[in-house]
């Protein structure tokens, strides 16, 4: 060991008894049991060691110290009379001959107890993140992240990928979220943008002749926070392959990810290749989501034709979906809570009935089903109902009914015993996404996801849509999502590398060749010099580590996260700047009236 210590606080064992050692770390706790007798717990990055104070000289040094002061302890290792089997160093203790104060904690009270920091208010944790990170449970998530990133780098290099960094200051580009803009001092009135993703650069690398690229890429998006998304910045395993198809991308990730998940995950079971592949529309029909959790064995059933005329108002003229759950004996109170949770998360009220232990349809909307014996019999047959089966239902326009059913399926799988194998990592690919959709605000045709994706069938498909032979909404994209345990890890695609196909694809959304050249000048021009077919993907590192650690919030796996309002309250960012700084950048702040 280097520095001023001979060992770490997690290193000493019984075989070290009799040695003179020097330890350094934080004074985690002191327990006085007499005027000149005390037990001190010394903690460093690696663990804790008990130090026993047995004389007036040593007590005079440690007694005035506040907890979390840093000290150096030189002393003799000896066997403990009262061992602690829960502690790695629990067989030994150190009797000090010298104690030095290295860094004094000047506060009598801490914002929170270090080892219980996760119980503290999140604002306090983020404000004093440097203290929060002293908690071994918090620190271990950051260590896990480092190990996972290292394993990803090694695996990608072994697969022949070259790590290349791409620019952070670049041009604004429509990637689906708001840009973070950076004013240019040398070019008044013009702005750089922080990259939402290295999308264009990695495609340009393929055009430049690089065969396999990757990087642990920082991405910046001005979007709202949620449990699996950190505002501001995030990192992804960005990769691209030249002369590659969807199958080539799948083969790489199906080889890279399962061993890492099995080794570093909370669970040691992960899907093996090939991952299950589910077309987008099938996923919405069967799971009510394009990011299904395949650990849950429940499926969504369409019962629109069976129940549209049953006399229940919310079903009339709407799509009706059902999620039957066998061997479910939830009490009425639990069912009511599930209904409330579904309504909060889906924004729509669910309905229910059950087949009780006698085989009768009861509870919820049962009276509407029982009103017509033929309807009841058809429902029983279609859903293969058995005694003690609970059925949740959603109704509305297709997408809303599907979404609500997806929320129902997820919550029911977690609440009803025997329908979710929680202790595993289950991957799947969602494929065959629609190329276009009708925009909610514009009411016109827009790109559904990534505008750089190759439309399935290429130019021929676009020309058919242009001639009115097919509906543009039926055009599929060579695009795919990677999902694990109901969390979308990434979107990827076979790229549109042909300038003529690219222009035609943009013409479908009312943008001509001049618009494409103006918005993507480098990419358009590069493709005109002969571009290889290429494909890629970019799984989110933060989300991967969140899954591996078993955490529910992505902020738990980021060293210095922002809060939900995209503020760094520890560093006080964003903050005001001086007028001189603004003048130098040719910017004026206009206050709202």
Image (tube, rainbow, N blue to C red):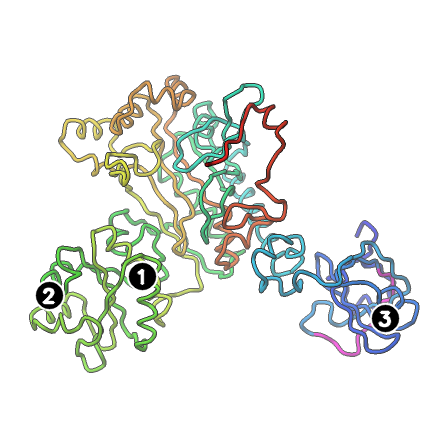
- Residue 517 in the image: state x and y as whole percent: 36, 19
Magenta stretch containing residue 237, yes or no? no
Closest to the observer, 413 or 237: 413
Binning the other alpha carbons within 10 Å of mark 3 as few (below 14), some (14 to 19) or many (20 upward) gives many
Instruction: Tell me how far mark 3 sits from mark 1, CA to CA.
Output: 59 Å
Residue wearing tag 1: 343
Q: Nearer the viewer, mark 2 or mark 3?
A: 2
Q: Is residue 158 above or below residue 588?
A: below
Magenta-tinted stretch: 73-84
- Residue 588 in the image: state x and y as whole percent: 54, 27
Residue reaching furthest to the bottom? 358
Q: Is residue 90 above or below residue 286?
A: below
Residue wearing tag 3: 53
The residue drawn where x is 28% and y is 42% is 432
The residue drawn where x is 35% and y is 38% is 246
Q: Is residue 423 above or below residue 126?
A: below
Residue wearing tag 2: 311
Binning the other alpha carbons within 10 Å of mark 1 as few (below 14), some (14 to 19) or many (20 upward) gives some
Q: Quadrant of residue 471?
A: top left
Q: Secondary structure at mark 1?
A: helix
Left or right of 155, for residue 353: left
Binning the other alpha carbons within 10 Å of mark 2 as few (below 14), some (14 to 19) or many (20 upward) gives some
N-terminal label among 3 and 1: 3
């Amino acid at each position: 060991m280097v520095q001023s210590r001979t060992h770490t606080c997690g290193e000493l064992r019984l075989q070290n008894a009799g040695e003179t050692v020097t330890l350094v770390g934080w004074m985690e706790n002191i327990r006085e049991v007499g005027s000149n007798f005390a037990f001190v717990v010394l903690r460093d990055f690696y663990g804790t060691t008990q130090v026993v104070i047995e004389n007036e000289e040593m007590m005079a040094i440690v007694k005035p110290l506040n907890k979390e002061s840093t000290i150096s302890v030189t002393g003799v290792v000896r066997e403990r009379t009262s061992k602690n089997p829960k502690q790695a160093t629990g067989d030994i203790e150190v009797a000090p001959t010298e104690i030095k104060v290295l860094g004094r904690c000047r506060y009598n009270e801490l914002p929170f107890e270090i080892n219980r920091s996760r119980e503290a208010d999140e604002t306090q944790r983020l404000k004093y993140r440097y203290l929060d990170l002293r908690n071994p449970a918090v620190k271990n998530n950051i260590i896990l992240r480092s190990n996972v990133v290292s394993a990803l780098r090694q695996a990608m290099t072994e697969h022949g990928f070259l790590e290349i960094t791409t620019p952070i200051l670049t041009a604004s580009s429509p990637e689906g979220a708001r840009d973070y803009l950076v004013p240019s001092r040398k070019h008044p009135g013009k702005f750089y943008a922080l990259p939402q993703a290295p999308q264009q650069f990695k495609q340009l690398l393929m055009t430049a002749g690089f065969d396999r690229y990757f990087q642990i890429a920082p991405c910046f998006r001005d979007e709202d926070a949620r449990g699996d998304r950190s505002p501001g910045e995030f990192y992804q395993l960005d990769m691209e392959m030249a002369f590659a198809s969807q199958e080539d991308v799948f083969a790489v990730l199906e080889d890279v990810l399962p061993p890492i998940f099995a080794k570093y995950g909370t669970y040691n079971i992960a899907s093996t290749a090939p991952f299950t592949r589910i077309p987008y529309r099938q996923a919405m029909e069967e799971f009510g989501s394009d990011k299904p959790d395949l650990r849950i064995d429940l499926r969504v059933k369409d019962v629109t034709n069976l129940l549209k005329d049953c006399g229940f108002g919310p079903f009339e003229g709407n799509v009706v979906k059902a999620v039957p759950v066998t061997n479910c004996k939830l009490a009425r109170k639990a069912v009511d809570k599930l209904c409330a949770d579904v309504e909060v998360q889906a924004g729509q009220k669910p309905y229910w009935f059950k087949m009780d232990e006698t085989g009768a349809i009861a509870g919820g909307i049962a009276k509407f089903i029982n009103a017509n014996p033929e309807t009841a019999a058809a429902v029983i047959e279609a859903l293969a109902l058995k005694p003690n089966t609970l059925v949740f239902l959603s109704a509305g326009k297709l997408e809303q009914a599907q979404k609500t059913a997806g929320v129902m399926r997820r919550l029911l799988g977690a609440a009803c015993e025997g329908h979710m194998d929680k202790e595993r990592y289950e991957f799947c690919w969602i494929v065959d996404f629609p190329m276009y959709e009708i925009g909610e605000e514009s009411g016109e045709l827009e790109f559904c996801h990534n505008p750089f994706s190759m439309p399935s069938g290429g130019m021929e498909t676009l020309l058919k849509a242009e001639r009115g032979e097919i509906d543009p909404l039926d055009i599929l994209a060579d695009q795919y999502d990677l999902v694990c345990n109901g969390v979308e890890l990434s979107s990827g695609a076979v790229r549109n590398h042909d300038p003529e196909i690219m222009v035609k694809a943009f013409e479908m959304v009312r943008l001509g060749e001049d618009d494409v050249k103006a918005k993507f000048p480098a990419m358009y021009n590069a493709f005109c010099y002969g571009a290889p077919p290429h494909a890629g993907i970019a799984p989110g590192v933060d989300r991967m580590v969140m899954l591996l650690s078993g955490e529910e919030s992505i902020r738990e796996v980021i060293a210095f996260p922002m809060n939900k309002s995209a503020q760094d309250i520890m560093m006080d960012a964003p903050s005001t700047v001086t007028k001189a700084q603004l003048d130098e950048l040719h910017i004026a702040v206009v206050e709202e009236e």
